[in-house]
Amino acid sequence: MTKKTFLVEIGTEELPSKILKNIILVFYKNFIDELNSNKILYKKINYFSTPRRLALQVIELDTSEKINEKIKKGPAIKHAFDQEGNPTQAAYYWAKSCKINLNQAERLKTQKGEWIIHRVKEKQENVELLFPKIIEKILKNINLKNTMRWETGNLKFVRPIRNIAMLLDTKVIKSIIFNLTSKNLLHHHISCKEDKIYIKNATEYPFILFKKNKIIANYETRKEKIKKEVKKIAKTVNGITKIDLFLLEEITSLVESPKALLATFKKDYIDYIPEEILTHTIEKQQKCFAIYNINLRNKILPYFIFIANINSKKNKEVVLGNEKVMHARLSDIMFFLKKDRKIKLENNLPLLKKVLFYNKLGTLYEKTLRLQILVEWLSSYINKINKDHLIRSCLLSKCDLVTQMVGEFPELQGTIGMHYALENKENKEVATAIQEQYLPSFSGDKLPSTNIGCLLSISDKIDTLSGMFYIGEIPSPEKDPFGLRRATLGILRIIIVKKIPIDLKKLVEISLKIYTTKKIDYPIISKKIIKFFISRLSSFYEKKRYNIKVIKSVLSCQLTEPLDIDKRINAISNFKKIESIILISKRIDNILKNNNQTIFNQIKIELIKQTEEQDLFKEIKNFNDKTKKLFTEKKYKEILLAIKNLEKPVHNFFDKVQINHSNLEIKTNRLLFLIKIQKIFLKIAHFSYLY
């Protein structure tokens, strides 16, 4: 067996940082699939990615020549031969296409039937010829939303491909891929165009990149280097960094020769700009790391760390350049803040009358009035809530949308409002709710911490959701431009996690009826919104790895209270002896299916003769007495335990009582026992989904 190392490096223009990790993983997985389908053996595949390159390195690749056997499947035996055993035209045509006589064919019998086949032994294509085809196929078929064409060709990729290197040990595999001839020249660093990096052996990768241009091709190694340098530099000024994983990932995807450098900004900015806004500017806007006081961990220091893409001899000039950019950004923010602070937040409320929320859905002022109606209605679901604070937070909720700061930083809506509210001496609970109305903003995001924040968030999201359905802007599986799936999931998460017993049907009805600008069929639109909620709820539990059968068993009950649904799903999922309850339900369903008749009668006590009947009747009565309060309190775990107690009398009834009695009246009476128990099950879930 001949074992070698294969290398391919695709040199590109700057790849988008947000999708770099995804691109290389798709490239890597698709390459593995191709090797497996071609039965090519190897020990390991390393993958590498930087903003300017994607690379794969196959270790101990088996390059020895192989003979592969392929089966050419013909027609089924019943179509290949007639009743007398003579070959049909279909068989002759197939044999001709295989360039064989029919007597050379074999028969293959499987569980699905029997066919005629022909075994063909083929010499596997040499990897030097096969791999370029595989590489080109993968590059052409990587499914990316935003691709581009370059120069005069019709080839598409996420960014123009400028160089391809391909080696098998020391041998250069020469081929034309994307109109480029592959060679042993690696893609250069963006700042080192004159430095040509020739690779003599595939095993030299990626070390030769670091040796020549200090390029760290391994993503995780690069990320770890940035992390260590940032922490080390922060200590030099008695500080610490709160490294945000998303920021670290983004910066790792932006550089290939990382060098962490310390820079400063004026202390005046700390005194004037709220810390949350300052941190957002440094980290989200400028892609740098903020530094905090080592003792007072929430106190930001007048320093920041940025990651250069090369260790330059002119690092001092690089630092000065970054400080100028940061100063310009922070001075702009100071200007906007000074301008905004001249006007009290509440004085912005009339200005909302001139700002359109959405076409056909009125202004932001009208939305504010709708939110007021919704939060007042929702307040009945939470005990001891300050209604004055609730209404105040609602009235101020959109006032920051007309400020200079939000105009410049729309992603800070709510956060700006909170700071201005606190500066205007508004109640802290009111200010917090203004910020929290947009939570959760994405899947897995934190939820509002206050009750007022929860109700304002639900109101804001349901108003948008109902409004969009009201004007027919319903999301499709492909498009959801208004983020209605995210908003719906946010409402559901708040209701379930915060244990608010809101009925979606009532919530949707009241939010829809506030819209009166055009005539619609309110019941039909309401049903569509409820259906949308339930579909999101199903996805929510599926992503949390709940059994799909359990999810369906509960959601099929047409329930509209998410908290109640959650209690049922969790009770069934966590009940250890659920299988014995499922067995009872299944036996009852099977008997009732076989006696397909509608029975409206009540159980007649005088017809209960056998001991087993009497025992079961008594247990059903006891069950109803014990669980009446439990059903009201929605304590499904305790209800399932009570059902478990019916197991023995039910099985005794099945084993010793003849249900299909010759006397129709007795038979009907005994079937009524089963109907009673079936109704108990249906009060929790449709257990038939669990069979």
Image (cartoon, rainbow, N blue to C red):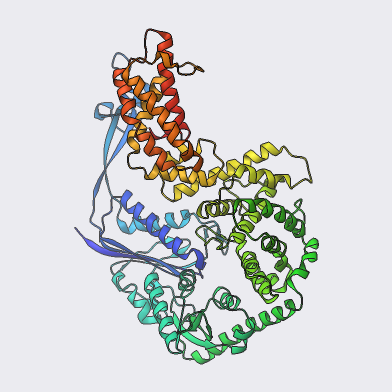
Q: Quarter of the image for the N terminus: give it.
A: bottom left
Residue found farthest to the top: 662
Which one is nearer the viewer's eye here, 93 or 329? 329
Which one is nearer the viewer's eye here, 667 or 400? 667
Please provide percent x and percent y for residue 583.
Answer: 34, 30
Instruction: Report which quarter residue 68 is drawn in.
Output: top left
Please provide percent x and percent y for residue 445.
Answer: 52, 61
How many numbered circles are shown?
0
Left/right placement of residue 429 relative to residue 47 reads right
Q: Is residue 686 visible?
A: yes
Q: Quarter of the image for the C terminus: give it.
A: top left
Please provide percent x and percent y for residue 474.
Answer: 65, 46
- Asked if 47 appears above or below 255 in the picture, the reply is above
Residue at (51%, 40%) from the top-left corner? 632
Residue at (46%, 53%) from the top-left corner? 141
Residue found farthest to the left: 1
Residue at (23%, 50%) from the top-left corner? 66
Which one is nearer the viewer's eye here, 667 or 406? 667
Which one is nearer the viewer's eye here, 470 or 326? 470
Please provide percent x and percent y for residue 468.
Answer: 68, 49
Instruction: Report which quarter residue 129 is drawn in.
Output: bottom left
Left/right placement of residue 379 relative to residue 125 reads right
Q: Is residue 97 visible?
A: no
Instruction: Report which quarter residue 575 is drawn in.
Output: top left
Left/right placement of residue 609 relative to residue 421 reads left
- Asked if 454 appears above or below 624 in the picture, the reply is below
